[in-house]
């Protein structure tokens, strides 16, 4: 695992957060038991013990409770069908609000968290009451950073994950993992369900910043991302990913930007960003068709029934 020794040395210097702070972890499960169970197991390796898990099962089969570590407090919400990430995650966030607690950790089920990764996140938030924080995320089994937050490049009409550690505030936090105070979550609100997948974390981050909160990456906290969810992990994108990323460029612009910046973003995406996506990630005939379908539906602000989550 990358830089584990240095990270542990850094963590020892951090002030341990109060043990009474309660953290609710929201996970969305779909199909891949080994990945979800691996994520759950990694959460047992934390010094901070006041953790509850809200697991939203997007698989039509009920989640097998007998596979969960008996030491963990897991609330399972079983859905009869795949609701998509944003709707299922919101379901988990509502349950977390209902249970009540100090913090909510949004975490992808295809991640593996470092031992005691949670303490630096909690300590940072306790010392900075208006901060929302995320860890450094590596590609699983590699020393290559997948993201340390992201940047919005309006002149290209795209968003880009940051691939190196930095103390500089990111423009947005990745939905793969971030920690937020419960009262901040209630103030900012839930993810936009009409986005279904992709850009929901970017839109939520900008909404938080607009309310006066600050985003930060905590380099001392590390997770690894396995990329097994549908539409992720490959150099060439899936049909579904090509469609929703193209479509949600327009949803994102109309939700987050006003005036000249909105038009700059849309013009830059149509002229530059969309072509970059075609060249780099959408090279098959099917993905090219999905890409242009996403642009068309984004312009009309609609959802194509052919791309419903199943």
Image (cartoon, rainbow, N blue to C red):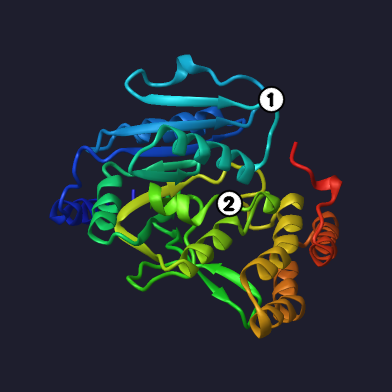
Q: Which residue has dot 2 on it?
A: 191
- The answer, for residue 46, to whether it is visible in the render is yes
- In the depicted structure, whether residue 254 falls above or below residue 177: below
Place of residue 82 in the rendered image (x, y in percent of width and height, measured from the top left): 69, 34
Q: Quadrant of residue 148?
A: bottom left
Element type where label 2 sits in the image: loop
Looking at the image, is mark 1 or mark 2 nearer the viewer?
A: 2
**Residue at image location 64% in from the left, 79% down from the top:** 156
Q: Which residue has dot 1 on it?
A: 80
**Residue at image location 82% in from the left, 67% down from the top:** 299
Element type where label 1 sits in the image: loop
**Residue at image location 49% in from the left, 56% down from the top:** 188
Q: Nearer the viewer, residue 140 or 184?
A: 184
Place of residue 92 in the rendered image (x, y in percent of width and height, measured from the top left): 52, 37
Q: Nearer the viewer, residue 174 or 254?
A: 254
Q: Quadrant of the C terminus?
A: top right
Number of labelled discs? 2
- The answer, for residue 162, to whether it is visible in the render is no
CA gap between label 1 and label 2 equals: 21 Å
């Amino acid at each position: 695992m990358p830089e584990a020794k240095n990270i542990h040395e850094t963590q020892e210097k951090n002030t341990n957060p109060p043990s009474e702070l309660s953290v609710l972890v929201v996970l969305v499960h779909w199909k891949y038991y080994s990945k979800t169970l691996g994520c759950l197991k990694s959460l047992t390796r934390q010094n901070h013990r006041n953790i509850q898990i809200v697991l939203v099962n997007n698989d039509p089969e009920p989640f097998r409770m007998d596979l969960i570590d008996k030491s963990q407090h897991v609330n399972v919400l079983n859905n009869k069908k795949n609701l998509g990430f944003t709707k299922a995650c919101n379901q988990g966030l509502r349950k977390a609000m209902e249970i009540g607690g100090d913090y909510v950790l949004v975490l992808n089920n295809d991640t593996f968290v470092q031992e005691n990764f949670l303490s630096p996140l909690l300590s940072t938030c306790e010392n900075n009451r208006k901060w929302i924080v995320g860890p450094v995320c590596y590609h699983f089994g590699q020393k290559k950073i997948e993201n340390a937050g992201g940047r919005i490049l309006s002149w290209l009409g795209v968003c880009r994950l940051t691939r190196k550690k930095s103390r500089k505030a990111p423009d947005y936090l990745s939905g793969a993992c971030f920690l937020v105070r419960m009262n901040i979550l209630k103030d900012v609100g839930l993810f936009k369900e009409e986005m279904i997948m992709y850009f929901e974390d970017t839109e939520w981050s900008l909404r938080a910043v607009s309310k006066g909160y600050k985003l930060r990456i905590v380099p001392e906290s590390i997770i690894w991302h396995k990329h097994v969810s549908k539409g992720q992990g490959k150099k060439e994108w899936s049909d579904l990913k090509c469609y929703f990323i193209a479509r949600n460029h327009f949803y994102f612009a109309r939700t987050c930007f006003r005036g000249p910046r909105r038009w700059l973003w849309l013009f830059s995406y149509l002229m530059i960003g969309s072509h970059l996506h075609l060249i780099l990630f959408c090279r098959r005939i099917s993905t090219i068709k999905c890409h242009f379908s996403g642009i068309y539906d984004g312009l009309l602000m609609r959802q194509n029934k052919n791309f419903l989550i199943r």
